[in-house]
Image: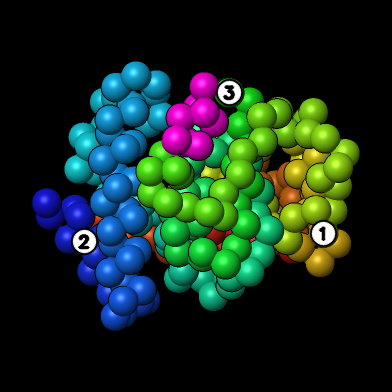
C-alpha cells in the first residue's frame, strides 16, 4: 500500500523506536475498523478509495505536528468529529491528552466509541450535542478546540470560544476556502500543504 507507506514515512520523521511501532499498529487497527464500520454508517465518503484514508485523512489530521503546536497533556474538544477525525489520530499520538469528540449525530459517536475500544484508547470520550447547545459544565473546560472540515457559522463562534480556557486556542484545519476564518480577529496561519494531499493550512485562533 503506497499511501500507507507515505503515512509511515511521515511518522518516521517524528517518532522512532517502540513508540513508532505502537503508533503504526494503532493506525492499522483504526484503518481496518473505519473501513469496516463505514459499510454500515457513513463515517467518510463512500466514494473515497480506502487506501486514500492514509493520506487525505490520517496524514492530514497529523499535519498539526508541522506547526510547533504542542497538544501533549491537553484537554481537547474535537468539534464536528464525524468519523473521529482528527480526534482519534490525535488520541493515538498524544496518549497523555484527553480527547472529547463532539458531534450532533449519536450513531457516529457510538461507532467511534467502539472503534476507540478496538484500538485500545483510554483517553477518549464523546459528547453528543450541537456546539450551540453544549452544556454549560464545559465552559472554560478545554485547553483547545480542534475543528476539521466544518464550515464555521457565525452562531458557532461564541460557543466555541466559551468552552475554551482564557489562555486556550481554537485550531482550524482548512484547505483553499478560508472565508469563514474572517469571523476571527487574531489568527496565525501555517501552510502545511503537501504534494500527497494538496493545499492545507492550520489556523490558530489566538
Q: Which residues are magenta?
A: 107-114
The reply to whether callout 3 and callout 2 are in contact (CB within 8 Å) is no
Q: Secondary structure at mark 2?
A: helix
Q: Measuring from the top left, give residue 100's x and y in whole percent.
A: 63, 46
Q: Nearer the viewer, residue 73 or 60?
A: 73
Say few, some or many: other residues with alpha carbon within 10 Å of mark 3 (under 14 / 14 to 19 / 20 or more): some
Q: Measuring from the top left, give residue 10's x and y in whole percent.
A: 29, 68
* Number of marks present in the image shown: 3
Q: Residue at x 31, y 72 (%)?
A: 20
Is residue 65 shown to the viewer in this render?
yes
What is the quadrant of residue 160 in the picture? top right
The residue at which mark 3 appears reads as 105
Q: Earlier in the sequence, mark 1 or mark 2?
A: 2
Q: Quadrant of the C terminus?
A: bottom right
Q: Measuring from the top left, give residue 177's x and y in whole percent.
A: 51, 42
Q: What distance separates the C-alpha of mark 3 from that of mark 1?
A: 26 Å
Q: Residue at x 31, y 38 (%)?
A: 33
Q: Residue at x 56, y 55 (%)?
A: 123
64 sits to left or right of 198: right
What is the quadrant of residue 153 in the picture? top right
- Secondary structure mostly seen in magenta is helix
Relative to residue 90, is residue 12 depicted above or below?
below
Q: Earlier in the sequence, mark 3 or mark 1?
A: 3
Residue 6 badge: 2
The residue at which mark 1 appears reads as 165
Callout in the foreground (3, 2): 3
Amino acid at each position: 500500500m503506497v499511501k500507507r507507506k507515505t503515512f509511515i514515512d511521515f511518522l518516521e520523521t517524528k517518532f522512532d523506536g517502540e513508540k513508532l511501532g505502537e503508533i503504526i499498529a494503532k493506525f492499522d487497527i483504526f484503518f481496518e475498523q473505519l473501513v469496516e464500520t463505514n459499510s454500515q454508517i457513513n463515517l467518510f465518503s463512500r466514494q473515497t478509495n480506502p487506501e486514500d484514508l492514509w493520506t487525505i485523512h490520517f496524514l492530514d489530521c497529523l499535519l498539526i505536528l508541522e506547526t510547533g503546536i504542542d497538544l501533549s497533556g491537553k484537554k481537547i474538544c474535537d468539534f464536528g468529529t464525524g468519523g473521529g477525525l482528527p480526534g482519534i489520530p490525535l488520541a493515538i499520538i498524544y496518549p497523555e491528552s484527553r480527547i472529547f469528540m463532539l458531534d450532533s449525530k449519536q450513531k457516529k459517536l457510538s461507532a467511534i466509541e467502539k472503534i476507540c475500544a478496538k484500538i485500545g484508547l483510554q483517553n477518549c470520550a464523546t459528547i453528543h450535542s450541537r456546539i450551540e447547545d453544549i452544556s454549560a459544565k464545559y465552559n472554560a473546560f478545554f485547553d483547545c478546540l480542534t475543528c476539521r472540515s466544518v464550515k464555521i457559522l457565525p452562531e458557532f463562534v461564541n460557543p466555541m470560544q466559551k468552552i475554551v480556557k482564557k489562555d486556550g486556542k481554537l485550531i482550524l484545519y482548512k484547505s483553499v476556502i478560508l472565508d469563514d476564518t474572517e469571523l476571527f480577529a487574531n489568527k496565525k496561519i501555517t501552510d502545511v500543504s503537501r504534494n500527497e494531499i494538496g493545499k492545507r493550512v492550520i489556523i490558530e485562533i489566538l
